[in-house]
Amino acid sequence: MKISAKTIQWLLLSVAAFIFFAANAPAFAQLAPLQIPYIDEWVASPHAWHSREAFTHWNDEGEIPPGLPPLSWSTVNPGFPR
């Protein structure tokens, strides 16, 4: 089986491109961990208490009926009846 010069050229170029990109890509293990400022304080604050009354007040009313847009949509579209 004879391999053409174009095939060899394409293979060499592909290997060279792979080596170039692999050598210049950052290693994921070397990325710094995500830092979220004040995350521990926020989690401990009332803002994160999703089970408190402020977040669950309307749960007994049920879900928004299907077919109705959310309230935020109707406030910017005054022609839509509430």
Image (spheres, grey):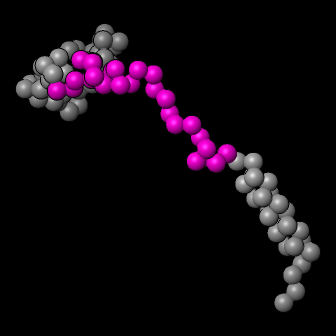
Residue sitting farthest toward the top = 78
Q: Residue at x 17, y 17 (%)?
A: 54
The number of numbered badges drawn on the structure is: 0
Q: Quick one: 17 or 5, which is closer to the camera?
A: 17
Q: Measured from the top left, where is residue 6 in percent x and y?
A: 89, 71
Quarter-of-image position of residue 62: top left
Tell me what residue is drawn at x 30 percent, y 12 percent. Answer: 75
Left or right: where does residue 11 sit relative to residue 27? right
Q: Quadrant of residue 1?
A: bottom right
Identified at 59% across, 47% down, the residue is: 28
Q: In the rendering, at what x and y percent does residue 5 appear?
A: 92, 75
Q: What x and y, as percent, mark residue 39?
A: 38, 24
Residue ranking furthest to the left: 60
> Is residue 15 toward the left or the right of residue 45 in the image?
right
Against 8, residue 77 (above or below) is above
For image coordinates 88% across by 86% down, the residue present is: 2
Who is closer to the viewer here, 59 or 80? 59
Q: Residue furthest bottom?
A: 1
- Is-magenta flag for residue 80? no
- Which portion, as a residue range, is magenta? 26-51
